[in-house]
Amino acid sequence: MTHQPKSDFLRIMSERGYLADCTDLAALDQALLEGPVTAYIGYDATAASLHVGHLLNIMMLRWFQKTGNRPLTLMGGGTTKVGDPSFRSDERPLLDDAAIQSNIDEMGRVFARYLDYGPGGATMLNNAEWLDGLNYLTFLRDIGRHFSVNRMLSFESVKSRLDREQSLSFLEFNYMILQAYDFLELNRRHGCTLQMGGSDQWGNIVNGIDLTRRVDDAQVFGLTSPLLTTSDGRKMGKSAGGATWLSADMLSPYEFWQFWRNTTDADVGRFLKLYTELPVEECERMGALQGAEINEAKTRLANEVTTLLHGADAAARAEATAREVFEQGGAGGELEIARLPADTAPGVTIAQALVQSGLVASGKEAKRLIAEGGLRADNDPVTDPQMALDHAALERGIKISIGRKKHRMLQLG
């Protein structure tokens, strides 16, 4: 990057590692210096919660607002009905209007933790507002004529599907046109001149910039963040148990805290810069620690990130639970509960209980886990998969430890 940013926002983006590409960094920098800029990131409502993979861009919006600019969070009430095909091997399942709105409501609760939606602050919008009422023939004539099919086929997100000879429906093919149209509408309605997103959205963002220039002769910009992987090559936010959700209803604050506490040593400094607001120098200092000291840096990371999402009290309770579980061998008051059906018969075996509560996928997996010495019940090693569990103890709750890092309270429904 040859241009050295002068605006607060781009300087922070550069220093902390958020910046992958920008369509015109110098011109955007000048626009930010001249006054508040309005920017948006779009989020399709395909699940009941956002996950850690979204968190980097949410932090970008937070910094954007903290540096005096106006963020828009665009909910894809309209585009979710189509589904973004970018870098997917199959078509997304289609949701009905009620499911989409329910997901948007849940996502809004997460955004409210990071952005100020008060007067003059951030604004949450829904692209169904302008997409649902489009006249198809008028849209084709006025908007569709600006898109080259040849160029659309060249985008990597489309090309990769076609190269693998995987079906790409006409419905999905329309997605990039609708997303481009979002930028045009936001520029007209809200004076929005910047779209941000992950680097996988570069083609969609460039489409919107090109459309807005062609139709309204307006100068707008695009900025992308890197697609993060952990130092061991995993996609950020993915774990053996699936996505790391941001909603407390889908992942407890304790489990969220543990996700960050389990960060590998090599990622600590980078994650502190991206996911906390600690000074860059402090992030780099903690990231360079070795031995036992790096574990304190991981605890600081977990506390800072959990505080932003769930509040300081939740972070403190999670840390206290972790210390009790790992250092003192206690049950831990914040452990997530794995429930057995309330009508479970007395004498259920430990292997059966693991399967029925969803802690393992099969009896075979339970037996293998026990045979390898990877299971403890109330801190005692389990050696027999046929060990019967005391019904009264199950009503109170039995602490189950799978390996060194996964702990649950096993309890009757």
Image (cartoon, helix red, strand yellow):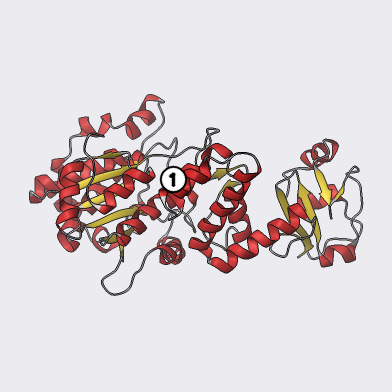
Which picture quadrant has residue 331? Answer: bottom right
Residue 25 higher or lower than 190, as above or below: above
In the current view of this chain or complex, which residue is farthest to the bottom?
119
Amino acid type of the residue tagged 1 in the rendering: Arg
223 left or right of 410 in image? left
397 left or right of 296 in image? right
Q: Position of residue 285 (x, y in %)?
A: 49, 44
Residue at image x 35%, y 49%?
Answer: 82
Q: Position of residue 231 (x, y in %)?
A: 52, 34
Q: Position of residue 193 (x, y in %)?
A: 19, 53
Residue at image x 58%, y 68%?
Answer: 313
289 left or right of 397 in image? left
Which picture quadrant has residue 211? Answer: top left
Mark 1 — residue?
92
Residue 307 higher or lower than 196, as above or below: below
Residue 24 higher or lower than 108, as above or below: above
